[in-house]
Image: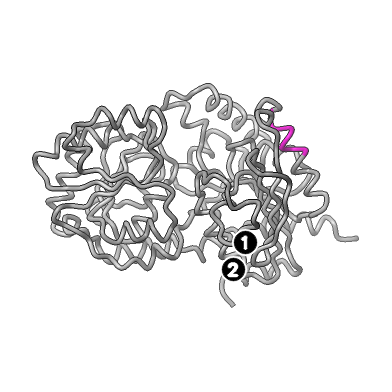
Amino acid sequence: MNGSARALALLKRPLTIAWFSFFPVEWLPDLPAPLRNLPKLHPASWQRVLLNELEKIADLRLHVLAIRKQFPRNLAFERHGVAFHCLKAPARLRAPSLFWLDTFLIHRTLKRVQPDLIHAWGTENGAALVASRLKYPCLVTMQGIMTWLREILPLNRYQRFMAALEERALRRLKTVTAESTFAVEHLKQRFPHLDVTQIEHAPDWIFHDVDRRPQVNPLRIICISSLCYEKGSDILFQALERLKGELAFELIFVGRAATRDAQRLICSLSAELRSRITFKENLSSREVADELATATLMIYPTRADNSPNAVKEAVVAGVPVIASDIGGIPDCVIPEQNGILFAPADITACLDAVRTACRHPVLGKGQVDAATLGRMRARLSPERMAQHFLEIYQNVVQPCRRQQQPA
């Protein structure tokens, strides 16, 4: 019996869990016909990785509730024993209602499901706030931390609104998980009443099994990110502009580059640098893994990030990572062993980090320290992630079940 199954056995009877808020159903294979033309939004791959592990547990019944204006209608389907509830929401009413619309739609569905526990993913789209309103044992998993981001980044009006709702929700909740040492400490200091447990969000097993064939002439640099100010895209491009006369390199940029700001940034680049960049979008996990197989190194120059999955995918694939020293990134990128860290928003520091990596006898060949790679793969395994979530499900549900037992 593996660790996940042992944790579940302690619950003594089948467990019903309801996930809600954003879930990327459009990235699932074999969707019902009405859902096959949905636009591809953020893949939230960590949720699908955990889903794949929990599907293996016979005594666990999982319901996934997703609310989206793009759904053609309310639709339910089952896949690998997991029940999906696609709830259509009218456009432009969710946030203005302070997510009471979401609360109503989710509550109506949960009355049929009768879960032992609700698991809200993130404070984005009001998920944590909705969880705090419902009369079920609940767990909230932090993704981004908006109350931190507003301290260090210029947020737009909607982001500031979401930060205010996040603060309101976290003051009412009891149990949350966070994926980085930084996030756990930040939440404990800001919200001391919270019971915060660290659970790393693991990359897909595909990334653990990448067959590395790093290209070193020219260097094949990869960046997997959104092309925007928050993710430091301007830092990346300005550093590469200075390097184009020193190094032979090409850049593979994996991420959305179709926004107006992104296009302005691309147009500001020199013709020579643009000729070295290939943009790719909406790649599957398998396609991202294929890109990592031949990358010499990754650059991730974010201004702020909790614990970016793209960095973790590169780390377990064995790709050296040059990244900002911020948030949860130092948990995974160990200087001189599997990458180089530099001060965020510092072009010169980014430039020096790239040069240092290229001169390094191991990193410069697109390789990492083998012992460090083994430790990171163990720390970031999907099985370990699933075991930890099952244990915390148990910790939240068991006291409630004992209260329900007759005296």
Checking the image for residue 390, the label placed there is 1
Tell me where residue 3 sits by quadrant.
bottom right
Of residues 210 and 191, the one drawn nearer to the viewer in this rendering? 210
Q: Position of residue 255 (x, y in %)?
A: 39, 44
Q: Position of residue 296 (x, y in %)?
A: 22, 55
Please rate how many residues cluster around mark 1, counting C-alpha atoms within 10 Å: few if below 14, some from 14 to 19, many from 20: many
Residue that numbered label 2 is attached to: 4
Please rate how many residues cluster around mark 2, counting C-alpha atoms within 10 Å: few if below 14, some from 14 to 19, many from 20: many
56 vs 241: above or below? below
Of residues 393 and 50, the one drawn nearer to the viewer in this rendering? 50
Disc 2 marks which amino acid?
Ser
Of residues 311 and 48, the one drawn nearer to the viewer in this rendering? 48
Residue that appears at 64% across and 46% down: 120
273 vs 249: above or below? above
- Local SS, label 2: helix
Give the left or right position of residue 222, taking residue 270 as reference: right
Residue contact between numbered discs 2 and 1, judged by CB atoms under 8 Å = yes
Secondary structure mostly taken by the magenta-highlighted segment of the chain: helix
**Quarter of the picture holding the C terminus:** bottom right
In the rendered structure, which segment of residues is drawn in magenta? 98-104
Q: Position of residue 306 (x, y in %)?
A: 44, 42
Q: Position of residue 162 (x, y in %)?
A: 58, 29
**Quarter of the picture holding the N terminus:** bottom right
Disc 1 marks which amino acid?
Leu
Give the left or right position of residue 379, taking residue 108 as reference: left
Checking the image for residue 141, the label placed there is none
